[in-house]
Image (spheres, helix red, strand yellow):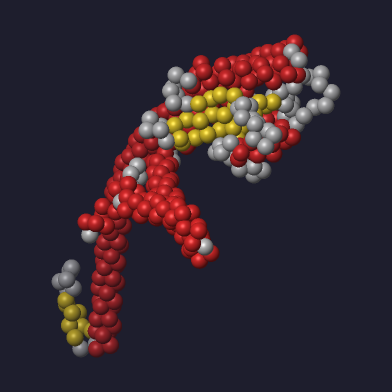
């Protein structure tokens, strides 16, 4: 048996072992439940505290993230606003530049149109002038008037700029033909650097048989070659409706070497262009002229030497002939001694003349007036 004392009333009572074990179990179970409840309550409180702390942390993080996003949004809005301002400024600049370019092109277009209108008006007036002029003149006078026009243009515009130039009518007939005008110009030191054969062609509108420019190209090329000219130019009013010939300077080099066909208004520009082009080769032409002059000196020396040899040989031949005649006369008859003597005297004279010529030949005389050969002989003697 076991005695137990009540903690509340103080009574002592006895219990057997079974009851005692049951009471102990009951106490243990009660304490366990209480402890368990307490622990569960503590865990629940801890969990609630943790959840509240987590919620607080999350709220703080969310608040910080929202603040950061707000700052980023404000920064992006500022960048967008700045970019939009730059875009508007760039668009304004582009518009201003485009407007200026448009106005500039518009001015250039207006100027070009005004210039073209002026040139067109001048060309139409010139065409009308020539048509009216052709209607009032005969075929012969039309051609002569075109020649006078070109000659006047040259003398007024180019003659003051080209003091050494030659521009005259071609009056020299070679093999039955001649051109209309020959133009040549040379440098200050006398070297010719350009030469042009000109042909002027025109006809009345009423002429029954209409000529074409190609009808005169072959003759013009032949005249150029006969007069030793470098270029050939046909100044033509033929085929007045042709877009090819009305368009400007027409190069005919594919048909004939260094040949051009022009309207009268391109007469001065073409001469100027050809002169500017030819002056670029002036140095080469100077060297060529010098080489030709040296060749002439050598040729003159050879001609003098040949003439001397021919003269000497002739004198020797004549002397031999006379001498042989004298021998024959002596062999034939003593009676002809007087005649033989005369022949011998003549033979002696020829021999003396030949000998005198031979003795009189010197390097100085052979090279007289020939600076090239003199220089060569002097160089040979010095060596």
Left or right of 212, for residue 371: left
- Which residue of the protein is positioned furthest toward the left in this rendering? 10
Left or right of 150, for residue 21: left
Query: Is residue 247 positioned above or below 71 on the image?
Result: above
Q: Give x and y (percent) for residue 177.
A: 68, 33
Residue at 67% from the left image edge and 37% from the top image edge = 175
Residue at 40% from the left image edge and 51% from the top image edge = 349
- Quarter of the image with the N terminus in it: bottom left
Q: Give x and y (percent) for residue 7.
A: 17, 71
From where the camera sits, is residue 289 visible?
yes
Q: Give x and y (percent) for residue 18.
A: 28, 88
- Quarter of the image with the C terminus in it: bottom left
Left or right of 180, for residue 338: left
The residue nearer to you, when weighing 158 against 24, is 158
From where the camera sits, is residue 309 visible?
no
Query: Is residue 240 positioned above or below 34 on the image?
Result: above
Residue at 64% from the left image edge and 42% from the top image edge = 256
Q: Give x and y (percent) for residue 29.
A: 29, 76
Residue at 40% from the left image edge and 33% from the top image edge = 190
Query: Is residue 262 positioned above or below 377 on the image?
Result: above
């Amino acid at each position: 048996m076991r005695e137990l004392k009540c903690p509340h009333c103080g009574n002592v009572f006895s219990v057997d072992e079974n009851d005692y074990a049951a009471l102990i179990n009951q106490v243990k179970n009660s304490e366990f439940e209480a402890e368990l409840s307490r622990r569960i309550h503590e865990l629940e409180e801890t969990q609630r505290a943790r959840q509240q702390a987590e919620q607080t942390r999350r709220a703080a993080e969310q608040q910080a993230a929202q603040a950061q996003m707000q700052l980023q949004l404000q920064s992006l809005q500022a960048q967008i606003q700045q970019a939009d301002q730059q875009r508007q400024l760039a668009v304004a600049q582009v518009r201003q530049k485009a407007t200026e370019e448009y106005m500039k092109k518009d001015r250039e277009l207006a100027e070009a149109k005004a210039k073209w209108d002026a040139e067109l008006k001048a060309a139409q007036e010139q065409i009308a002038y020539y048509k009216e002029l052709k209607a009032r003149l005969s075929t012969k006078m039309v051609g002569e008037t075109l020649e006078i026009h070109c000659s006047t243009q040259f003398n007024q515009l180019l003659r003051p700029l080209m003091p050494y130039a030659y521009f005259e009518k071609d009056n020299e007939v070679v093999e039955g033909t001649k051109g209309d005008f020959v133009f040549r110009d040379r440098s200050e030191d006398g070297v010719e650097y350009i030469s042009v054969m000109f042909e002027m062609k025109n006809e009345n509108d009423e002429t029954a048989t209409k000529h074409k420019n190609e009808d005169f190209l072959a003759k013009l090329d032949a005249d150029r070659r006969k007069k030793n000219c470098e270029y050939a130019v046909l100044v033509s009013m033929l085929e007045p409706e042709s877009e090819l010939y009305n368009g400007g300077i027409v190069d005919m080099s594919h048909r004939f070497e260094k040949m051009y066909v022009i309207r009268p208004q391109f007469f001065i520009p073409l001469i100027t262009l050809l002169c500017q082009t030819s002056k670029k080769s002036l140095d080469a032409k100077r060297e060529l002229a010098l080489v030709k002059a040296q060749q002439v000196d050598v040729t003159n020396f050879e001609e003098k030497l040949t003439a001397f040899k021919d003269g000497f040989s002739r004198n020797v031949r004549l002397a031999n002939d006379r001498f042989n005649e004298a021998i024959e006369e002596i062999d034939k008859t003593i009676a002809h001694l007087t005649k033989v003597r005369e022949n011998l005297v003549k033979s002696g004279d020829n021999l003396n003349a030949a000998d005198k010529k031979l003795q009189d030949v010197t390097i100085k005389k052979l090279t007289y007036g020939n600076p090239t050969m003199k220089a060569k002989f002097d160089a040979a003697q010095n060596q």
